[in-house]
Image: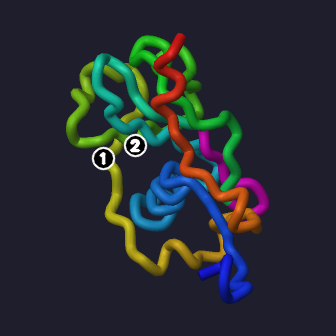
Amino acid sequence: LAAFSGARLRASTSLELLALAAWLRHDVSRACAIRPVLDARRDRVHTARIELVADRVKVAVAPAAIAIRDCLRATASDEIVLLAPTLDPGLFAPARVQAIPPINAGDLFHAALACDDIAAECLEPLYLMGTYAE
Protein backbone atom coordinates (compact mmCIF):
# COMPACT_ATOMS: atom_id res chain seq x y z
CA LEU A 1 0.00 0.00 0.00
CA ALA A 2 2.80 2.41 0.85
CA ALA A 3 4.49 1.82 -2.49
CA PHE A 4 1.39 2.59 -4.55
CA SER A 5 -0.65 4.99 -2.45
CA GLY A 6 1.95 7.09 -0.68
CA ALA A 7 0.63 5.93 2.70
CA ARG A 8 2.99 6.55 5.59
CA LEU A 9 4.70 3.35 6.77
CA ARG A 10 5.75 2.92 10.38
CA ALA A 11 7.60 -0.01 11.95
CA SER A 12 8.30 -1.44 15.39
CA THR A 13 9.26 -4.88 16.67
CA SER A 14 6.98 -7.46 18.28
CA LEU A 15 9.28 -7.32 21.33
CA GLU A 16 8.42 -3.63 21.75
CA LEU A 17 4.74 -4.48 21.44
CA LEU A 18 5.03 -7.20 24.11
CA ALA A 19 6.74 -4.77 26.50
CA LEU A 20 4.03 -2.17 25.93
CA ALA A 21 1.35 -4.77 26.68
CA ALA A 22 3.10 -5.62 29.96
CA TRP A 23 3.11 -1.99 31.06
CA LEU A 24 -0.55 -1.66 30.08
CA ARG A 25 -1.95 -4.97 31.41
CA HIS A 26 0.40 -6.38 34.06
CA ASP A 27 0.61 -3.25 36.17
CA VAL A 28 4.40 -3.28 35.72
CA SER A 29 6.07 -0.14 37.04
CA ARG A 30 6.99 2.21 34.23
CA ALA A 31 10.43 2.49 35.84
CA CYS A 32 11.10 -1.22 35.19
CA ALA A 33 12.77 -2.32 31.99
CA ILE A 34 11.11 -5.22 30.19
CA ARG A 35 12.95 -8.16 28.62
CA PRO A 36 10.59 -10.17 26.39
CA VAL A 37 11.99 -13.67 25.90
CA LEU A 38 10.68 -15.81 23.05
CA ASP A 39 11.74 -19.39 22.36
CA ALA A 40 14.18 -19.57 19.44
CA ARG A 41 14.76 -23.32 19.95
CA ARG A 42 18.15 -25.04 20.30
CA ASP A 43 18.65 -23.48 23.78
CA ARG A 44 18.39 -19.96 22.35
CA VAL A 45 15.92 -17.13 22.82
CA HIS A 46 14.88 -14.00 20.97
CA THR A 47 15.19 -11.07 23.35
CA ALA A 48 15.85 -7.34 23.77
CA ARG A 49 15.88 -4.84 26.62
CA ILE A 50 12.93 -2.46 26.27
CA GLU A 51 12.51 0.68 28.38
CA LEU A 52 9.85 3.32 28.77
CA VAL A 53 11.52 6.72 28.37
CA ALA A 54 9.42 9.89 28.51
CA ASP A 55 6.29 7.76 27.96
CA ARG A 56 7.75 6.24 24.78
CA VAL A 57 8.76 2.61 24.24
CA LYS A 58 12.49 2.49 23.48
CA VAL A 59 14.75 -0.40 22.47
CA ALA A 60 17.69 -0.08 24.87
CA VAL A 61 19.51 -3.24 23.73
CA ALA A 62 18.90 -4.41 20.16
CA PRO A 63 16.94 -7.60 19.53
CA ALA A 64 19.02 -10.73 19.02
CA ALA A 65 18.81 -14.51 19.15
CA ILE A 66 21.16 -15.55 21.95
CA ALA A 67 21.87 -18.57 24.15
CA ILE A 68 19.70 -18.85 27.27
CA ARG A 69 22.79 -18.59 29.51
CA ASP A 70 23.78 -15.33 27.76
CA CYS A 71 20.26 -14.00 28.23
CA LEU A 72 20.50 -14.72 31.95
CA ARG A 73 23.84 -12.88 32.14
CA ALA A 74 22.38 -9.91 30.26
CA THR A 75 19.26 -9.66 32.45
CA ALA A 76 19.63 -6.81 34.94
CA SER A 77 17.99 -6.66 38.36
CA ASP A 78 15.70 -3.82 37.23
CA GLU A 79 14.16 -5.93 34.45
CA ILE A 80 10.95 -7.92 34.28
CA VAL A 81 11.32 -10.99 32.05
CA LEU A 82 8.25 -11.68 29.90
CA LEU A 83 8.51 -15.39 29.22
CA ALA A 84 6.99 -17.32 26.34
CA PRO A 85 4.86 -20.26 27.54
CA THR A 86 7.19 -22.75 25.82
CA LEU A 87 10.07 -21.81 28.14
CA ASP A 88 10.61 -23.14 31.67
CA PRO A 89 10.49 -20.29 34.22
CA GLY A 90 12.99 -22.23 36.36
CA LEU A 91 15.65 -21.60 33.71
CA PHE A 92 15.41 -17.87 34.41
CA ALA A 93 15.67 -17.87 38.22
CA PRO A 94 16.32 -15.61 40.04
CA ALA A 95 14.93 -13.11 37.49
CA ARG A 96 11.46 -11.63 38.02
CA VAL A 97 9.39 -13.57 35.48
CA GLN A 98 5.89 -12.90 34.18
CA ALA A 99 3.88 -14.52 31.41
CA ILE A 100 3.55 -12.73 28.10
CA PRO A 101 0.39 -10.60 28.32
CA PRO A 102 -2.40 -10.55 25.74
CA ILE A 103 -1.98 -8.03 22.94
CA ASN A 104 -4.85 -6.07 21.42
CA ALA A 105 -4.82 -4.79 17.83
CA GLY A 106 -5.27 -1.28 19.21
CA ASP A 107 -1.87 -1.56 20.92
CA LEU A 108 -0.27 -1.06 17.50
CA PHE A 109 -1.63 2.50 17.54
CA HIS A 110 -0.81 3.36 21.16
CA ALA A 111 0.95 6.71 21.54
CA ALA A 112 3.77 5.13 23.58
CA LEU A 113 4.78 2.75 20.79
CA ALA A 114 7.53 4.79 19.15
CA CYS A 115 7.17 3.50 15.62
CA ASP A 116 9.76 4.80 13.18
CA ASP A 117 8.77 6.19 9.80
CA ILE A 118 10.34 4.04 7.10
CA ALA A 119 10.41 4.07 3.31
CA ALA A 120 8.63 1.08 1.75
CA GLU A 121 11.77 0.10 -0.18
CA CYS A 122 13.74 -0.07 3.09
CA LEU A 123 11.29 -2.29 4.95
CA GLU A 124 12.87 -5.62 5.76
CA PRO A 125 11.78 -8.20 8.33
CA LEU A 126 13.99 -8.35 11.41
CA TYR A 127 15.56 -11.77 10.89
CA LEU A 128 16.99 -12.68 14.27
CA MET A 129 17.93 -16.17 13.13
CA GLY A 130 20.87 -14.60 11.30
CA THR A 131 22.65 -14.41 14.68
CA TYR A 132 22.84 -18.23 14.66
CA ALA A 133 25.80 -18.03 12.29
CA GLU A 134 28.29 -17.40 15.09
Q: Secondary structure at mark 2?
A: strand
Q: Residue at x 59, y 76 (%)?
A: 110
Q: Residue at x 59, y 33 (%)?
A: 78
Q: Residue at x 53, y 23 (%)?
A: 131
Characterize the local packing of mark 2: few (<14), some (14-19) or many (20 or more) Cα atoms within 10 angstroms. Answer: many
State whether the magenta stretch is mostly helix, strand or loop: strand
**Residue 124 percent coordinates (x, y):** 61, 52
Tell me which amino acid carries mark 1.
Ala
Q: Which residue is mark 1?
A: 99
Q: Which residue is mark 2?
A: 82
Residues under labels 2 and 1: Cα distance? 5 Å
Above or below, 100 relative to 116 = above
Above or below, 83 relative to 108 = above
Q: Verify whether residue 54 appears in magenta.
A: yes
Farthest residue to the front: give it: 4
Evaluate if marks 2 and 1 touch, with contact meaning CB atoms under 8 Å apart: yes
Q: Quadrant of the N terminus?
A: bottom right
Res 38 → quadrant: top left
**Residue 5 percent coordinates (x, y):** 68, 88
